[in-house]
Image (tube, grey):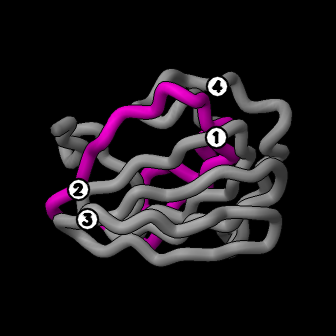
Amino acid sequence: MKQKRFSVAQLDEITPVACPCGEARRAFAEPGNNLATVHLTDIQADSRPHYHKTMTEIYIVLEGEGHLEVDGEMIPLRPMTSIMIKPGCIHRAVGNLRIINVPMPPFDPADEFEV
């Protein structure tokens, strides 16, 4: 039988896990995927500053307003704001927000460092 060349995830049905930003529902963390994962993340007002040594993240704001602290700068966030966070950039989101986060390569908890 031919192996499928696609994967499907119902983000709202994935069990959330705690992360420095709040809670994330992580999709596509599967064997053989070395490209990216997709996270539906609910940001909490008490998110903690952190960085990644190898991972790039793209945030896409779906709901809410707040700001993103990136290497000491404040970026306003509102629905449809998107930002790319490169390796080594200290960041944290502040506000009540729901975002899509696309980590590349796939999220690895060993590559998450709190400040």
Q: Nearer the viewer, residue 87 or 14?
A: 87
Q: For marks 2 and 3, give the one nearer the viewer.
A: 3
**Residue span colored magenta:** 26-55
Where is residue 62 drawn, in percent x and y?
Answer: 81, 58
Could you tell me the amino acid type at mark 1? Gly
Q: Is 108 on the left or on the right of 30, as rendered?
A: left
Q: Which mark is residue 95?
A: 1
Instruction: First in sequence, mark 1 or 2: give its number.
Output: 2
Where is residue 45 drawn, in percent x and y?
Answer: 57, 30
Instruction: First in sequence, mark 1 or 4: give its number.
Output: 4
Q: Is 66 on the left or on the right of 111, as rendered?
A: right
Quarter of the image where one finds residue 4? bottom right
Q: For marks 1 and 2, give the one nearer the viewer.
A: 1
Q: Which residue is mark 3?
A: 71
Could you tell me the amino acid type at mark 4? Pro
Q: Nearer the viewer, residue 22 or 31?
A: 22
User: What kind of element bears circle 3?
Assistant: loop
Q: Which mark is residue 52?
A: 2
What's the residue at 44%, 66% (across, down)? 57
